Image: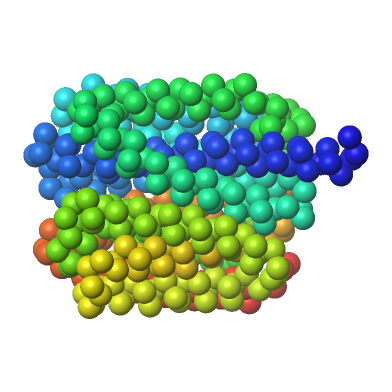
């Protein structure tokens, strides 16, 4: 085997394993929302109370993600990934035994803690073990696997819940999490780095936290905060929004969210190709999100025929997905490269904590609009947030590399 073919084989193995782990994390993003139709009447919850469970998830994930980046830099990503998946399994088991709202909030907290490790661990592995020429494709697979996890979760969980109840669905999620833990453990060579577990000197507090003084880091944080606040509105409330704006059945309305997620997956594939061909990542992001925002406004107007809503949601997801690989490369280009590979965990952990914070805030912003019956306003809010995210991406693109 030539050195080139060995390098390709190694890259494929690493990208595949990290993608699988990321898909698992996104599956557990949706441990609770697909079961809302069962959990809300069972425990007498409002939309705002149901959304608050996801707020707990993402608040814990945001705080944990910023902290776990330092742990990844200290002990390496392998053990951190295994601990995160173990938290998912525990969260699903607690859900299966839940007897009140407090336990449901605990489920959100445990799952959020598990979720917190993935971006700093995943991007540390990809940046340090994948050849630079294939990083665009690696980030594309990473994002695509997340969307696949999102797409599988509603079908898997609601299918089990409809047949055997929501507690059985929770046990099914725990079984899937246990399988994922075993796969990551058995293929641990793909996520292990040279020097894992060795004590790393960061040169004191100033250099350890020096990345917080970089404007690019804060602009990337703001980008994730805005874009995921918008996404959270769709993830949590797309089905009832489409029921009320377009009079769709529950099944047809749920299909619009699936269309959005599958469109996003296709967009990520296309975005990986485009990102590899263009260095203007900020402008590519601006064009893609601008088209997505325009589509959100059209859907909000309620002027589309009912049969076309899924197509429109798929198109919006496709446009948003195109921005994904360029987004990850923009973070690497504008922020992480300043601080060296020993800081990948903490920089990615902090920047991507904006993602979790946005998803935590989203139910609190859009839940009251849902309770007030202002369903079209939810989609208008999505478009406004996407527009604001464009400004931050362009701002990062204008900052000097060093």
Residue at 64% in and 26% down: 187
Q: How many numbered circles are shown?
A: 0
Residue at 66% in and 73% down: 280
The answer to which quarter of the image holds residue 115 is: top left
**Residue farthest right in this picture:** 2
Residue 110 visible in the picture: yes
Residue at 52% in and 76% down: 287
x and y percentages locating residue 182 in the rendered image? 54, 21
Q: Residue 164 versus residue 126: which sits nearer the camera?
A: 164
The answer to which quarter of the image holds residue 93 is: top left
* Quadrant of the drawing holding the N terminus: top right
Q: Say left or right for 389 vs 232.
A: right
What colouring does the structure picture have? rainbow
Residue 204 visible in the picture: no
x and y percentages locating residue 279 in the rendered image? 70, 70
x and y percentages locating residue 256 in the rendered image? 30, 58
Is residue 150 positioned above or below 276 on the image?
A: above
Residue at 43% in and 54% down: 262
x and y percentages locating residue 121 in the rendered image? 59, 39
* Quadrant of the drawing holding the C terminus: bottom right
């Amino acid at each position: 085997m030539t050195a080139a073919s060995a390098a390709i084989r190694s890259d494929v193995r690493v990208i595949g394993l990290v993608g699988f782990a990321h898909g698992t994390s996104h599956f557990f993003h949706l441990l609770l929302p697909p079961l809302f139709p069962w959990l809300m009447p069972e425990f007498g919850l409002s939309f705002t109370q149901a959304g608050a469970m996801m707020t707990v998830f993402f608040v814990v994930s945001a705080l944990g993600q910023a902290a776990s980046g330092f742990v990844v830099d200290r002990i390496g990503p392998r053990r951190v990934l295994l601990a995160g998946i173990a938290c998912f399994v525990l969260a699903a088991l607690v859900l299966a035994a839940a007897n009140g709202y407090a336990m449901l909030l605990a489920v959100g907290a445990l799952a959020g803690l598990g979720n917190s490790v993935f971006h700093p661990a995943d991007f540390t592995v990809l940046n340090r073990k994948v050849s630079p020429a294939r990083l665009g494709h690696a980030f594309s697979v990473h994002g695509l696997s997340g969307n696949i996890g999102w797409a599988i979760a509603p079908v898997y969980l609601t299918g089990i819940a409809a047949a055997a109840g929501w507690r059985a669905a929770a046990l099914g999620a725990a079984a899937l999490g246990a399988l994922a833990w075993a796969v990551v453990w058995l293929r641990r060579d793909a996520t292990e780095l040279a020097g894992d577990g060795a004590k790393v000197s960061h040169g004191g507090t100033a250099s350890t936290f020096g990345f917080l003084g970089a404007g690019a880091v804060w602009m990337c944080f703001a980008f994730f905060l805005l874009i995921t606040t918008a996404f959270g509105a769709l993830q949590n409330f797309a089905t009832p929004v489409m029921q009320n704006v377009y009079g769709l059945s529950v099944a047809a309305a749920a299909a619009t969210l699936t269309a959005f997620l599958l469109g996003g997956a296709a967009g990520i594939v296309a975005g990986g190709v485009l990102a590899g061909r263009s260095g203007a990542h900020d402008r590519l992001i601006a064009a893609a999100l601008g088209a997505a925002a325009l589509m959100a406004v059209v859907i909000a107007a309620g002027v589309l025929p009912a049969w076309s809503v899924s197509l429109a949601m798929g198109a919006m997801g496709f446009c948003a997905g195109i921005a994904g690989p360029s987004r990850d490369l923009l973070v690497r280009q504008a922020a992480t490269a300043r601080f060296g590979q020993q800081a990948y965990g903490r920089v990615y952990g902090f920047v991507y904590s904006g993602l979790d914070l946005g998803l935590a805030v989203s139910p609190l912003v859009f839940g009251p609009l849902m309770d007030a019956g202002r369903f079209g306003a939810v989609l208008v809010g999505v478009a406004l947030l996407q527009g604001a995210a464009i400004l931050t991406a362009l701002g990062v693109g204008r900052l000097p590399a060093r």
